[in-house]
Amino acid sequence: MTVGIIRSSLKEVDSKVPELLELIKYKPKKKKVFIKPNIVDAINAKSGVVVPPQLVDALIEYLINKNISINDIVVAEGTGFFNEEKHFKRLIKESGYIKLEKKYGIEIENLENTERITKTWEYGEIELPKYIETHEYINIPVMKTHSQATVTLAMKNQKGLLLLKDKQKFHRTNAYGNLHDSILELAKVAIPDLIITSAIFAIEGHGPTLNPQSKTKKLDLLLAGTDLIEIDNVCCNIMGFDVNEIKHIPKVEFSTVGIPLDEIKTKFKGPDPYMKVQNVYVHSSDGVCTQCSMAISRMFRKILFVEEIREKFEKLNKNYNRIDLIFGSDFTELPEHAIPGQTFCFGVCTTNLAKEKDIPYVKECPPHYNDMIKLILSVVEE
């Protein structure tokens, strides 16, 4: 198996997608196709957070030219934060995917509500979309860093296939294995026919979403292959990460065609052990799922872009040299240097710690970012 690599800007995807797939000699084996792009946030694709809808559009045109009917093409995503239907519609609108719906007369499907099959895997049984067996399955991730998994690529993108309850279990070691082992085991039962990794825009730093410690990295690259682990190895190589240090990706030999790796290797800034925004320290364990990660991202976006809230946040940082925020199920003690009265817990996973240490907390799953902001700023208003 071989991984193809080409240069492509967003404007060039219509011609570059067929070129890329010809490079690896890909041909669809089935007459029905399931496309699973990474659409984790309601944000423009130029952020690097989501797969550009223009790329999916180019792929659909390629498939139609291969005599696959638009009626036999399913585009679907499953996201923990936007799993409710009203929120999912907002996700599709704000990420730009509504244009695909209008162009082709299709509806981007919410995988939370799709028909499922039961697969046997390392940890018993797991429910996956029936499309992975009935359709040609095409996995489209974005090249990004990840605060817990170091990188999120093709293997990690498959978490979007899961029901919300199983997404959450991936982060709770008493449910399945740990996060890293669960991602690897999922790759053994959900096997795509094609992977196209979007690195036109990417994310480095404290990904996988935009926050004060992550940023967009423009690479203008597309990769394609038919083996999950191989293409993720190639991506790590491009990003400057030692795959031996990525817990969910086994190291394998790989071959590439197209642009030589030496011409495009770069160095992504990796995630930090914790997020620090001025005097606010955010501690996230492996037990933090996408819902809390998204809530953190949205909380800081609102703090930084709403003037009244930003002024209160600046007052908080002036008056306190340290505020600690705790997310995830793995904490049994407070982080080092955390100060009682200036420490807060968020999410149902932190309930036991919050009660044991008598720490104020927002217990909803996921915690709403407005409630998070209100609790944090309450120390200013006391």
Image: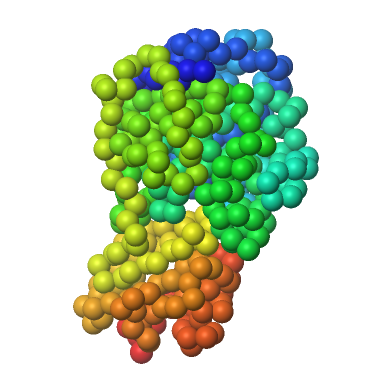
User: Where is residue 8 shown, x and y percent of the image?
Assistant: 36, 21
Judge whether residue 128 can be spotted in this image.
yes
- Quarter holding the C terminus is bottom left
**Horizontal placement of 366 versus 224: left or right?**
right
Q: Give the residue at x 40% y 53%.
A: 147
Of residues 216 and 170, the one nearer the viewer is: 170
Q: How many marks?
A: 0
Q: Give the residue at x 53% y 38%.
A: 155
From what the image shows, is residue 246 above or below residue 236?
Answer: below
Judge whether residue 312 can be spotted in this image.
no
From what the image shows, is residue 8 above or below residue 37?
Answer: above
Q: Residue furthest left?
A: 318
Way the structure is coloured: rainbow
Of residues 121 and 21, the one nearer the viewer is: 121
Q: Give the residue at x 72% y 47%.
A: 126
User: Where is residue 38 shown, x and y percent of the image?
Assistant: 52, 39
From what the image shows, is residue 275 above or below residue 85?
Answer: below
User: Where is residue 345 shown, x and y percent of the image?
Assistant: 47, 75
Q: Give the residue at x 56% y 31%.
A: 139
From what the image shows, is residue 258 above or below residue 281?
Answer: above
Of residues 239 and 87, the one nearer the viewer is: 239
Q: Quadrant of residue 178?
A: bottom right
User: Where is residue 327 shown, x and y percent of the image?
Assistant: 47, 68
